[in-house]
Image (cartoon, grey):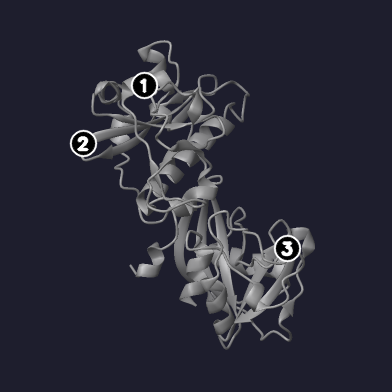
Amino acid sequence: MAKWDLEHAFADGCFLERREDLRTDPEAMKLALAEPSSRWLLHNPRLHFLLHETGDTPAPLPKLGTLWFSKEAAAKAIAAADEASMERESSFLGVHNGVHYFTVASTFGNAEDMPEDVLDPHAQAGFYELRKSVSQLPSAEATVLGYARSLLAWQSDFTYCPKCGQVLDLLDQGHRKFCASCRKNRYPVIMPCVIMLVCSPDRTLCLLGRKSSWKEGVFSCLAGFMEVGETAPNAAAREVLEEAYVECDPESIELVSTQPWPFDANLMIGCQITARANPRAKEQAVNHEEGLAEGRWFTKSEAQEMLERSVDAAYLGAMPNEGRAQGPSEMRVPGPHAIAHTLIKRW
């Protein structure tokens, strides 16, 4: 696999072995939960994770690291009434080097409210939103946190049976829900999306767009959800036509890479696709009803300059000017955490 396939966040493979055979075995889970070496990750109800500053770089964007807690400390952090409730509320993430890893929700919304025997008050720790802090984390840790966030979001959002409305039971240590009335299993939902770098027939220009909710000057690849019964090539061509009125040949598509995107549970299918005709102007008309504010065609040298000014993980970063960005010297693209960065860099 080419190096560029692995540059974006959440895509370098989870270092944990997920071990379906363990999480579906109640006795195995009971032993894992009781194992003194097992470790817990803490999150708050907003699905922000408890992280700490590693001291590698100063503020405003210090390097961050994941905090893993023993069962005893995690139980204090969630104010568990008894061991059974602690085990019931824990979701199994996987195994690494013989250690079992779990995540559980803390009853403390802020790190400073935690008991000192759980968290050192000098630990420079806090609950961080993953989307804004992903570029501050080591890649392997970000992948685990992305996996955990997707799982937890599904647990939170998918409470009732979609068929009969009964409350679902959470089984397999957080990975399966079951309707006792319908006798149906429900599993985490993954929503596939296509994200496309559109290039001109002669490959000298690429089309990028800016969503209306983004800061001025921040451009990225066009993207959209796949529809039922649709292939990735057809979805890519349809999305480009709907969003920017540009016809593309589905057969020209190159599938480049994929990225699990845990906000929430998307699978980004990164590709490059070719327009059927060269653009007539640098600015491209876009469909504002699709959420786009503007579209432009960029040369390779312009795209390279935008990569060098790429925006960090908050990824809609503030531009130096208050009004509309007037030229490529004021424009940026998402940082290396995003698959869009990979697609543009590869081109």
Q: Measuring 37% from the left and 52% from the top, which residue is drawn there?
A: 56
In this view, the mark in front (2 or 1): 1
In the structure shown, which secondary structural element does the residue marked by tag 3 occupy?
strand
Q: Amino acid at mark 3?
A: Leu
Of residue 326 and residue 192, the one placed in the foreground of this image is 326
Q: Tell whether 202 sits left or right of 145.
A: right
In this view, the mark in front (1 or 3): 1
In the structure shown, which secondary structural element does the residue marked by tag 1 occupy?
loop
Are discs 2 and 1 less than 8 Å apart at CB? Answer: no
Are discs 2 and 3 less than 8 Å apart at CB? Answer: no
The Cα atoms of the two marked residues, 2 and 3, are separated by 48 Å
Image height of 84 relative to 69, above or below: above
Sequence-wise, the earlier of marks 2 and 1 is: 2
Examine the image and state in which quarter residue 285 appears. Answer: bottom right
Q: Measuring 38% from the left and 19% from the top, which residue is drawn there?
A: 75
Q: Which residue is mark 1?
A: 117
The Cα atoms of the two marked residues, 1 and 3, are separated by 50 Å
Mark number displayed over residue 98: 2
Residue 312 percent location from the top left of the image: 53, 59
Would you say residue 316 is visible in this rendering?
Answer: yes
The Cα atoms of the two marked residues, 2 and 1, are separated by 26 Å
Q: Which residue is mark 3?
A: 292
Sequence-wise, the earlier of marks 2 and 3 is: 2
Image height of 155 relative to 26, above or below: below
